[in-house]
Amino acid sequence: MIEITVDGERVPGIEGQTVAGVLLAAGRMSWRTTRSGAPRGVFCGIGACFDCVLTVNGVPDVRACRRRAADGDEVRTQSRQEKA
Amino acid sequence: MTRVVVVGAGPAGLAAAEAALRAGAEVTVLDQSDAPGGQYHRTLYGARQQGFERLLARCDWWPESTVWALETTAAGNAGAADRAAGESAAGDAATGDTGAGDLAAAARAAGDAGGGDLVVADPATGVRGVGDAGAGDAAAAAPGAGGRGTGLRLHVLRGPADGTGRTRHTLEPDALVLATGAHDRTLPFPGWQLPGVFTAGAAQALAKGERVAVGRRVLVAGAGPFLLPVAASLLGVGAEVAAVLEANPAPTVLKGWRFPTRKAGELAHYAATLARHRVPYHLGRTLVEARGDERVREAVTARVRPDWSVIPGTERTFAVDAVCVGHGFTPQPELAVVAGCVLDGGFVRTNKDQRTSVGNIYAAGEITGIGGADAARAEGAVAGCVAAGGTPSPELLRERDRTRRFADRLKAAHPIGAAWPGWLRDDTIVCRCEETTYGEIKAAVADPTTPGPHALKLGTRAGLGPCQGRMCGPTVAELCGGTERHHRPIAQPIRLGELADPKETPA
Ligand SMILES: Cc1cc2nc3c(=O)[nH]c(=O)nc-3n(C[C@H](O)[C@H](O)[C@H](O)COP(=O)(O)OP(=O)(O)OC[C@H]3O[C@@H](n4cnc5c(N)ncnc54)[C@H](O)[C@@H]3O)c2cc1C
Ligand code: FES
């Protein structure tokens, strides 16, 4: 078992799961907002659509479906929303 | 000894590596994933690979390696031009870029001029530019200085996906086999941007690779035989599958599947699995809308005619928490595009030896046509053998041709019906990244001040977001009356910081 934090909240996962897999298994469907503020999560699952990007250990724009989660990873959700 | 580099460790790339080894080459295999197998041989993390370790132990195996750029110099292209001249006089219309061709053209022109410039980008920040190859690297400045003057140089980043501390490397092979595969094609429909809508491949990858079910109650819809293993995998990880919907009618599908092949047995096996779980498989019905507020709650389906026009009054609503949609696959030919390889309808054009139009570059697997793992393997074996300087056996060539014919039949069995845009509404999102709607695209197409796809893209921003048209490219091209998808010279994102740091680590 591993544990990551998502916006400070602890989420358990299984060794080898991607960040996307950990989040989906925990029942989270979305973790990013678009320019218009609409929620997005996984779509293609293999790194082609860029819908699933989030910040991992301070590094933004990491595709959650491509990155294996490591114990202790600090994940933050991201917004592309245009500042009003 | 010939040095062959294979990009992609899916069925095509692995077969290429094996054949190239057998023909006596020194082989390097790269994949951006940390495990071999590609989309087909996906296993749980840490599980034993299916015999690939033995093969890869004889190669130079580079997992977690992303090829983000590729240079071909005059030396490489000259030989190609001679060879290709006889083979591909016809069909140069295929190279007529309808999309973001300018950067590709610039890269190609630079390559032809021997400059070897690179096209780079960071989709995450949207910054693009044509940069100088390996600034500060003396060897890079000389045209054709690629090691033995074969005119190929690959730029590689090694390290965790989208990480920062990745190391930069270059490789200068004698021959290159591109086996970069495909991703799902999904047609847009109202609500397809909602969380809970997945591509069929995403559901498959999460189920097979991580034992994660994308939902508790899932509807699987679209076109193609791939929907069946996807539904079976979902059942295997405990999801309830509400139904599997194939948009094409039974006569069309059966015609293609009546084929003496073990694939037909595979199909029967999946059908039996669905039947055991009492999952209905409907033909001639499809998903036309996903509904929900912050996520999918309902799937609206309808019966469609053979051209996929919706039959009014046949709508049915399913309560679901996820839908998986696939309308076939789209090749990932970015590296081939950067190298200047000629495409046909988005696929890399190859001759009977799997040679592309560019010298020393071969292509195999789903970037040359969607045919499944068997076709990918057969093509890979031919490509690897020829790239290493060998001659493929007649049996191998026959096998390749046989699997290709099968792929053609599959394509005929699961076409995309021309009337599908009928289920779009003016506010339906077409470009997921930039949230460009169908209405905006229609207006731009009708506007005489935005002639041509390029102006249209700039005007609507369709295809200019982080995915660079990977998702909407073929759709936008189709909605604008074009046939060719956008040509994207951007292979893989690289962070500007990584780009700015010119240090290369010796291989
Ligand atoms: C998400 C998904 C799931 C699928 N699941 C199945 C399945 O379960 N069963 C089935 O029969 N078919 C499946 N398919 C169909 C599959 O595409 C083919 O059957 C088969 O895997 C094609 O083989 P390939 O070698 O051409 O490509 P792939 O298997 O796609 O292999 C391509 C490899 O290239 C690598 N790559 C791409 N670009 C780069 C780069 N720039 N640098 C480094 N590496 C790179 C990728 O990481 C990948 O491993 C799936 C397709 C998709 C898109
Ligand atoms: S889900 Fe498409 S890139 Fe991650």
Image (tube, rainbow, N blue to C red):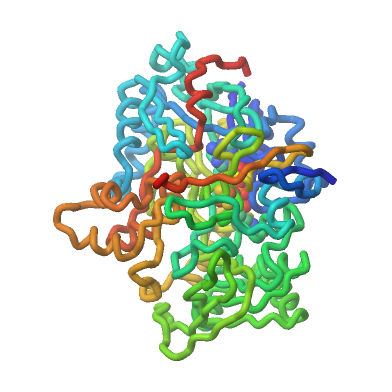
Q: What is the x, y in percent for residue B92?
A: 29, 46
- Would residue B366 be seen by someone viewing this image from the given angle? no
Please indicate whether residue B503 sits to the left or right of residue B62 in the image. Answer: left
Query: Who is closer to the viewer here, B81 or B248?
Result: B248
Q: What is the x, y in percent for residue B492?
A: 50, 37
Query: Seen from this angle, which residue lies furthest front?
Result: A84
| Total tally of numbered discs in the picture | 0
Q: Is residue B443 above or below residue B244?
A: above
Q: Residue at x 38, y 71 (%)?
A: B424
Q: Quadrant of the C terminus of chain B?
A: top right
Please indicate whether residue B139 sits to the left or right of residue B23 in the image. Answer: left
- Would residue A43 be seen by someone viewing this image from the given angle? yes
Q: Residue at x 59, y 40 (%)?
A: A62
Quadrant in which residue B126 is drawn: top left
Query: Seen from this angle, which residue lies furthest right?
Result: A1
Q: What is the x, y in percent for residue A31?
A: 60, 51
Q: Residue at x 49, y 83 (%)?
A: B302
Q: Is residue B323 above or below residue B344?
A: below
